[in-house]
Image (cartoon, grey):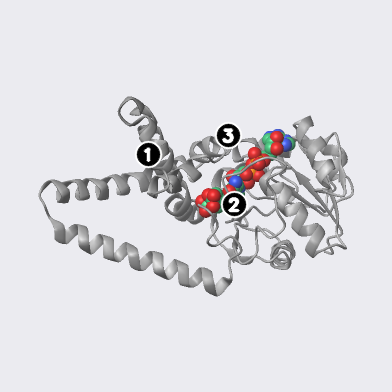
Amino acid sequence: MTIRRVAIIGLGLLGGSLSLALREKLPGIATTGYDRDPATRTRAAERGLVGTVYDTAGEAVSGCELVVLCVPVGAIGEAARDIADVLPSHAIVSDVGSSKRSVQKALAEALPSHTCVPAHPVAGTEQSGPDAGFATLFDGRWCILTPPDGAPQQAIDDLTALWQALGAKVEIMDAEHHDLVLAVTSHIPHLIAYTIVGTASDMEDVTRSEVIKYSAGGFRDFTRIAASDPVMWRDVFLNNRDAVLEMLGRFTEDLTALQRAIRSGDGETLHELFSRTRDIRRSIIDEGQDDASPDFGRDH
Ligand SMILES: NC(=O)c1ccc[n+]([C@@H]2O[C@H](COP(=O)([O-])OP(=O)(O)OC[C@H]3O[C@@H](n4cnc5c(N)ncnc54)[C@H](O)[C@@H]3O)[C@@H](O)[C@H]2O)c1
Ligand SMILES: O=C(O)C(=O)C[C@]1(C(=O)O)C=C[C@@H](O)C=C1
């Protein structure tokens, strides 16, 4: 199917970036948008994020071939129900949510007769809202598609071609596997950042000005991640509960082993782990340079 018109529901960081990337890289495609927050709709129109911002989701999806839901994963069901009665029957529905199992279920329940192909562009920042988006966010980044069994190949191909045209590399994955992988690579790192910054703040009596004063070091990296949107991340943890809890169990065991090594003065264990993790960091950097990743080296 030729995609001529794309509706974007949710005009924050991801919706805004997707709209700007579409407008810049695929200018032949018309874009429409809706956000449930009136102030966001006004700002999105001022920034020209999409061709037309509508006051209802129904108007935004009218006549489109593709709808992309760019809302927190806990709001996907509601956003899909909002358009269910007016969505053109041939339209493909996708999303950008950070967890995929619950999204797949919510879409199947809300839109049983439509073609739904969930997606997750693994690219973002700690910013949110209609001013946060930028057109190059997806350049050289992975976008993981998690089509349910029986999804039409044509729809998968159309979505793959679209994300590739926006600069992303596409991978197809089972939703369950996606959630397990992302629990380790994205969700638990965020949980650790939220925890360490929370712990430091709870210790304010002891640390007070030192937290600010010395935050140019490793702690500063954690504060960037811990500044990420609270609604988005609340929803990620509630919607990827099983995978996060499973991986958190393994993480806790490894942390306990390190605790034991420190207590018993086992420097060999510490040195071996730290050498291994340094190699991992170096290989990620090498890969990033090969990809010319756009935000590599930004101020973390
Ligand atoms: N932030 C990241 O780094 C990142 C990266 C990849 C994927 N994601 C995923 O992208 C999605 C959007 O995240 P974001 O960072 O753009 O958040 P954001 O807060 O910047 O934008 C979300 C927008 O959705 C709107 N919204 C909420 N419920 C709605 C509804 N029912 N109907 C219409 N609009 C609604 C909000 O008003 C808000 O403007 C989330 O599912 C998130 O998991 C985020
Ligand atoms: O760079 C960041 O700020 C991010 O947290 C981006 C990040 C990630 O964890 O890598 C966050 C959530 C996503 O779903 C995808 C990307």
Q: Residue at x 20, y 50 (%)?
A: 257
**In the rendered image of this protein, does residue 263 appear above or below residue 166?**
above
In this rendered view, identify the residue nearer to me: 83 or 274: 274
The answer to whether the beta carbon of the residue marked 2 is less than 8 Å from any atom of ligand 1 is yes
Along the polypeptide, which appears first: circle 2 or circle 3?
2
Which residue is denoted by mark 3 in the rendering? Answer: 231
In this rendered view, identify the residue nearer to me: 289 or 191: 289
Q: Which mark is residue 124?
A: 2
Which residue is denoted by mark 1 in the rendering? Answer: 196
Measure the alpha-carbon separation of dots 2 and 1.
Answer: 21 Å
Identify the residue at the far bottom of this view.
290
| Res 76 seen here | no
Q: Secondary structure at mark 3?
A: helix
Callout 3 amino acid: Val
Callout 1 amino acid: Ile
Residue mark closest to the camera, 2 vs 3? 2
Along the polypeptide, which appears first: circle 2 or circle 1?
2
